[in-house]
Image (cartoon, rainbow, N blue to C red):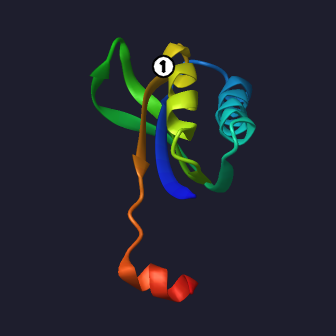
């Protein structure tokens, strides 16, 4: 399984309950497609480096998860059409040689 790191910026204009719902929906989409959530870090509201549309702030969420190679191609389209997620980025984490020997 590959390890991934996903950063999601959620529209801060929605209510706190809706933000929690969006974070839960992101996690459920990953687990529904065979992924395993390792860590969720709700960073909170931060000022954006540049405006995205009319938004100058965003609610940041960092997810660490594992999944097969095709997991990203299955979940990414769902995040792109969600209007409450203003930006997302998912990166594959490299496994260092020290981590490989530690896992053996």
- The answer to whether residue 11 of the structure is visible from this angle is no
What's the residue at 36%, 12% (across, down)? Answer: 54
Residue reaching furthest left?
Answer: 50
What's the residue at 61%, 19% (across, down)? Answer: 14
x then y, percent, for residue 80: 48, 19
Left or right placement of residue 24 versus residue 96 in this view = right
Left or right placement of residue 11 versus residue 28 in this view = left
Left or right placement of residue 71 versus residue 80 in this view = right
- The answer to whether residue 5 of the structure is visible from this angle is yes
* Above or below: residue 74 compared with residue 41: above
Q: Which residue is mark 1?
A: 80
Q: Nearer the viewer, residue 15 or 31?
A: 31
Where residue 33 sits, quadrant-wise, is: top right
Q: Nearer the viewer, residue 65 or 97?
A: 97
What's the residue at 70%, 23% (across, down)? Answer: 18
Question: SS class of the residue under badge 1?
Answer: helix
* Above or below: residue 87 compared with residue 62: above
Image quarter where the N terminus lies is bottom right
Q: Nearer the viewer, residue 16 or 89?
A: 89
x then y, percent, for residue 63: 56, 49
x then y, percent, for residue 9: 47, 32
x then y, percent, for residue 32: 74, 36
Image quarter where the C terminus lies is bottom right
Count residues near mark 1 (Cα–Cα under 10 Å), then give few for <14, some for 14-19, many for 20+: few
């Amino acid at each position: 399984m590959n390890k991934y790191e996903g950063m999601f910026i959620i529209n801060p204009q929605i209510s706190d309950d809706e933000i929690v719902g969006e974070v839960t929906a992101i996690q459920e989409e990953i687990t529904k497609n065979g992924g395993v959530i390792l860590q969720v870090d709700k960073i909170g509201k931060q000022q954006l480096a540049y405006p995205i549309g009319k938004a100058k702030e965003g609610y940041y969420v960092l997810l660490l998860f594992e999944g097969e190679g095709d997991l990203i191609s299955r979940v990414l389209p769902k995040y792109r059409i969600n209007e409450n997620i203003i930006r997302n980025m998912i990166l594959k984490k490299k496994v260092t040689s020290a981590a490989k020997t530690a896992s053996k």
